Image (spheres, grey):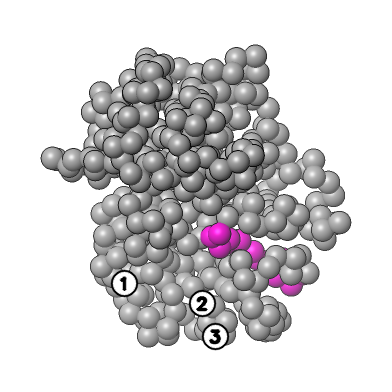
Amino acid sequence: MILDTAPHISSVGQVKEFFLARQPILDQNQNLIAYELLFRRTGVRAPVSAEDTRGAASIIAHTSELGIENVTGSALGFFNVNSTLLMGDLVNFLPPEKVVFEFPQTDKITPELVRRVAELANAGYRFALDDVITLSEYIKPLLPFVEIIKIDTSVMTYADLAMLVRQFKQAHKVLLADKVETLEQFQNCLELGFDYYQGYYFAKPALLSGKKLATSQLAIMELMTLVARDADTIEIEQRIKKEVSLCLSLLRLVNTPGMGVTKSIHSLSDALMVLGRRQLQRWLQIQIYVGPDPQIPFGSPLLLLAATRGKFLELVAQKLQPANRSMADIAFTVGILSLLDALFGQHMERILRQIVLSEEITEALLYRTGFYGDLLKLAEYLEKPGEAGRLLMPLLARLGLPIEELYPFQLEAFEWSNSLLPTL
């Protein structure tokens, strides 16, 4: 068993103390290139130093068992490691072409560690140096084997960042700006020449006065309204036919093996019959995030984040209200529509005036109130555990959700959102 090689881990059950954070890393064009994978404790029994080793070992062991593609899809996975883990064999269970080991520059850099990093680098593993605030003599022994330098931009001045960028660019390193939470921060880091960006700035709405929705987005919102008010299939079909790209996408979807059809479907009416109203509504909610460039299925990482939220909320609602299927559907809708303001660059209130939604969905999206508002807050807390960790346990208690449910629900949501790629 791979788990037996992890320090202090003797059973899968012990992982119940953790939940998973999957934080996106984007390039300069806002395309997803990686996720940093973090385990966070839900309790406070272990000291921080033990938590770091145990959590990192847990995520490496379980990702090895699951297959990293099920957690990160086609993106790379950044894994936090320390010298204890690097000196062991556990890291070798991860495929070198899929991972980047993120090493804190605050760890003690010994000749033995440098040799081990060199050995892993020669085997194809890539390294990022975290918590870098200066190009010191201390870290120079590791630099030949480190590809990416990760800098916490929230604690440094613009002038200090500019100096660091110049120094590390001269050393031919890739620069990753961490904790980028606003569009202004992103623009500053882009101007300085950072290559990669980590943070949720992309999920914040850039409110632009006078911005208009694209024709295809308006069409999808009209179709969502038609489905919500249970319009005739003929009316829905006629509206879809006006959008050639939507027709092609819908026909491609129903002809995928996962739909279970025994013969090819070429008519829109047959496609709508196969899909059904519930799946049609979900397909439309996903399509509204799809970028215009067919060569970049996830032109915006908002789609993956929204899809993950939607599936996670659905799973939690199913757990808490197993006898009420409609509540799971509503939860999915709340999750997947929760980023429309970031997508459209408009206030959520203005957007919701253009769609027919129930009052409980509207209240959840606007004010994070009610049962569905609590579910949405739960997803948001899990995305940014450092900021919201203290709020998580009281919310779980209020919902009556066992801690051990978080990890499997998150994994299923990650896998589901990753699986959307071939069908778009």
Does the magenta-highlighted stretch encompass residue 76? Answer: yes
Does the magenta-highlighted stretch encompass residue 381? Answer: no
**Relative to 159, does residue 52 appear above or below in the rendering?**
above
Label count reads 3
Which range of residues does the magenta coloring cover? 74-88
Q: Quadrant of residue 262?
A: top right
- Helix, strand or loop at label 1? It is loop
Is residue 103 in sight in this rendering? no
Who is closer to the viewer here, 41 or 30? 30
Q: Which numbered marker is on residue 232?
A: none
Is residue 140 in sight in this rendering? yes
Which amino acid, mark 2?
Answer: Glu
- Helix, strand or loop at label 3? It is helix
Instruction: Please identify, in this view, whether the residue under mark 3 or under mark 1 is nearer the observer.
Output: 1
User: How far apart are the alpha carbons under marks 2 and 3?
Assistant: 8 Å
User: How far apart are the alpha carbons under marks 1 and 2?
Assistant: 16 Å
Residue matched to label 3 = 144
**Mark 1 closeness class: few <14, some 14–19, many ≥20 residues within 10 Å:** some
Sequence order check: which comes first, mark 1 or mark 2?
2
Sequence order check: which comes first, mark 3 or mark 1?
3
Q: Which numbered marker is on residue 193?
A: 1
**Relative to 392, does residue 33 appear above or below in the rendering?**
below
Instruction: Please identify, in this view, whether the residue under mark 2 or under mark 3 is nearer the observer.
Output: 2
Residue matched to label 2 = 147
Residue drawn 64% across the image and 52% down it? 70
